[in-house]
Amino acid sequence: MARVHVHTLEFTDRNRLASAFERIISDERVESCMVETEELRIRFVSTTERATPLIERIYLEGGLRFSQRHPLGIGLSPV
């Protein structure tokens, strides 16, 4: 079973953010997506195998200034 991660992307401007958001939400293998417009940030949940080519395409379009991923915790309880 592939591991699921939270991927965080930060952008240089709102146009790049909007373009990446459209690409991410149109991908059927992205589980969830959240946009923080003031911070020019997108966080989405997907497997690394699927997210890597998606992030590479976004990078090639330009405007991506930061990319990071963290494993999604399994079995965590809300506080």
Image (spheres, rainbow, N blue to C red):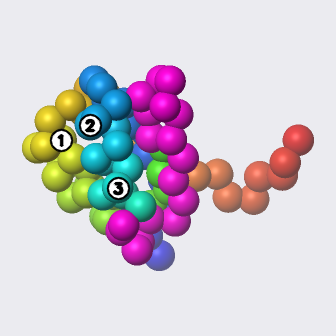
Residue that badge 2 annotates = 16
Q: Which mark is residue 5?
A: none
Q: Position of residue 49 (x, y in %)?
A: 31, 64
The amino acid type of the residue labelled 1 equals Tyr
Residue at figure coordinates x 11%, y 44% from the top left: 60
Tell whether label 2 touches label 3 (CB within 8 Å): no
Q: Earlier in the sequence, mark 3 or mark 2?
A: 2
Residue type at tag 2: Arg
Question: Which amino acid type is shown beneath numbered disc 3?
Answer: Glu
Residue bearing the label numbered 1: 59
Relative to residue 70, is residue 67 drawn left or right? Answer: left
Rounded to the nearest angstrom, the CA distance separating label 3 from label 2 is 10 Å
> Where 46 sits versus 55, above or below?
below
Label 3 – label 1 distance at C-alpha: 14 Å
- CA–CA distance in space, label 2 to label 1: 10 Å
Q: Which residues are magenta?
A: 26-42
SS for callout 1: helix
Which part of the image, by quadrant, shows the C terminus?
top right
Q: Which mark is residue 22?
A: 3
| Crowd tier of the residue under label 3, counting other residues whose Cα lies within 10 Å: few below 14, some 14–19, many 20 or above | few
Q: Quadrant of residue 69?
A: top left
Work out whether mark 2 precedes mark 1 in sequence or the reverse, and give the earlier one: 2
Magenta stretch encompasses residue 6: no
